Image (spheres, coloured by chain):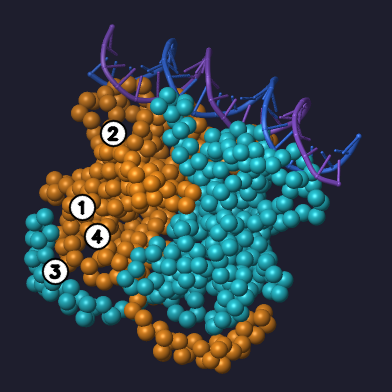
Chain colours: A cyan, B orange, C blue, D purple
Amino acid sequence: MDRVAEQKETLNDKGQNLETFLREYKTKELNQYEKPSVTVDTLVFTVRNKMAKNYRKLPKKELYVLLVKRGNHPYIGDWALPGGFVNLGENIDEAVLRELKEETNLEQVYTEQLYTFGDPDRDPRTRIISVSYLALISHEHEGLLKAGDDAFDAMWFKVDSNLITQRARENEDGRQDILQEYHLKLTPERESEKPLSARLCIKNTPKGKSMSREVKIIESEGIAFDHAKIITYGLERIKNKLEYTDIIFNLMPSSFTLSELQQVHELLLGEKVYAAQFRRKIEQKLTKLGDLTEGKGHRPAQHYSYNPLWKLAFEKEVYGL
Amino acid sequence: MDRVAEQKETLNDKGQNLETFLREYKTKELNQYEKPSVTVDTLVFTVRNKMAKNYRKLPKKELYVLLVKRGNHPYIGDWALPGGFVNLGENIDEAVLRELKEETNLEQVYTEQLYTFGDPDRDPRTRIISVSYLALISHEHEGLLKAGDDAFDAMWFKVDSNLITQRARENEDGRQDILQEYHLKLTPERESEKPLSARLCIKNTPKGKSMSREVKIIESEGIAFDHAKIITYGLERIKNKLEYTDIIFNLMPSSFTLSELQQVHELLLGEKVYAAQFRRKIEQKLTKLGDLTEGKGHRPAQHYSYNPLWKLAFEKEVYGL
DNA sequence: ATAATAGTGTCTGTCAGACAATATCGT
DNA sequence: ACGATATTGTCTGACAGACACTATTAT
């Protein structure tokens, strides 16, 4: 395009064309201002079974998040999300995948950008802006993990998040703020480590004509930086996306029963789901596998796998091609 | 807490406590690696009326985005989103509000974080990571704007985004990618400026067990950097949030008719809405004002305002306090 | 037989889609 | 009366909530 060529030769106020401008910028202006550092932090979630004592009962599902023990200041000895600095020549998405591979040996994982956190005092070293990502894996992937290798200091923590209080308060503008207090509890997979916990306050304020939500850490025990906040954001994102996307299947193994899928739904939503209508709704997204029975003290279940093409197939069936 | 005190005195591998670690970090390590710059870019949207020639017809609604003309390299003469560098001591949200105040004189505006873009080559000057924000204002706020002041070189552009082709293609993994091509057209409010346009390709790829979507700019005319991509992200965010939030009211003036609200819905969704059920659904969120008639050649409409407390009131009515 | 889970049947009310019908203005 | 928008009425089918019922296994 000649427009681009024309632009290159256009002179700015100082009479510079693009080339001379860039040369001067890179030598003079570039390091004039102090810059923040940029990191990525990844929330790796997975779902595991907790075996029940009763031989008849099904194993319960539990949500786990992957944390890495900090071996250096700040927050030495605390647990943090896996992550690291973004290299200069590297895409942010790539940085996440690279860090994930380096720190946890995981590849081919579903990731999505979550939120960018940049409070000036979120890291005592310097101004660090963190772009957080969500990664979901099934327990089938866990085998690949270096985590569990004690030398590596990565460990899975069971996640429990509970609403403890909710109240309304009048703010300066005379409008109602809604304050929710959450308790986040992280239980290590092995008892050699102490459990972690945090209390968070979520303030819903009327902002313009909609609500804006602000999350604050009231207290954080054993969780480094503002990572308790990031975990809370991640939990919420999953919860919201559960209804209108298929991300849940990233947490499921390749084969599962409808009850297992329902259990994971209930785990993430934090509430019971009616089995009958759940089955009816979700079945269209699934492929029925063979009658893979298990040797339990109750009726065996069908096994299913996720069919990523369900939407096409469904439309074909309903609307005729 | 004594845990924090204890942590301060814990020694790392080099035998440093927190204080000595931080001192060394700030002098030695901090500037060891080259860092990216961080900017914020804000998508300011508003809705305006386009008067119809027929005296009976209602004015059509049009979506506008605010752009600023670049007076320097790179992309000199092109139009860009208002934004700027994040100061070191400043929260990202604060930076957005500050830039918005500085560049457009707007205050008390609804903003939300959109997405963080960080391709290494998105800015020819150096590696710049941009945290983009969405800001919605009603045309009542426009009066406060410096924009329209020619000296300031900020201008509103009418936004038209159209799907032009959609096709499926098999990728390396043997799975189906869905490719959509969009045409983005930005028409300046005053004819002294040329219209801008861009073509974008959205690739939906199966990633793990869900879809990941990747937006690429094929061609961008007069729109600086990757800002056409950011605009596309913003449009999509609004579209998605329309269903399950009340953000649309940030685009509406304090008083409006149901038809106007419906028109804005249709504008943002890009499809017709059935009037009857739209009214029934949305009415609960509104307060009916006086019978503010207009002098048009047809039945006058009721005027409404948004009631931010509708949810409370609604629950009270249905469930009895 | 029993405890536990798997899966189906069905009634109800709500609500979206669709469309028709009526109301009210300025010219 | 006409052309336009405003507003209400109503029929239909789909579907979610709720609950009951049947089926199947290991002990």
Instruction: Name the residue located 68 percent from the left edge and 82 percent from the top edge.
Output: B2
**Which residue is the site of mark 2?**
B60
> What amino acid is found at the position of numbered circle 1 in the picture?
Ser
**Which residue is the site of mark 3?**
A18
Q: Is the C-beta separation of discs 4 and 2 under 8 Å?
A: no
Specify whether A182 is left or right of B250: right
Residue B81, by quadrant, is: bottom left
Q: Is the C-beta separation of discs 2 and 1 under 8 Å?
A: no
Q: Label 1 to label 4, Cα distance in Å? A: 9 Å
Q: How many marks?
A: 4
Query: Relative to B228, is A73 above or below?
Result: below
**Which residue is the site of mark 4?**
B225
Q: Position of residue A50 (x, y in %)?
A: 71, 56
Q: Nearer the viewer, residue B284 or B197?
A: B197
Disc 4 packing (10 Å; few <14; some 14–19; many ≥20): some
Q: Nearer the viewer, mark 2 or mark 1?
A: 1
Dot placed on the residue nearer the N-terminal end, 2 or 1: 2
Dot placed on the residue nearer the N-terminal end, 4 or 2: 2
Q: Label 1 to label 3, Cα distance in Å? A: 18 Å
Specify whether B127 is left or right of B2: left
Q: Chain of mark 3?
A: A
**Which residue is the site of mark 1?**
B220
Residue A128, by quadrant, is: bottom left
Q: Nearer the viewer, mark 3 or mark 2?
A: 3
Specify whether B61 is left or right of A2: right
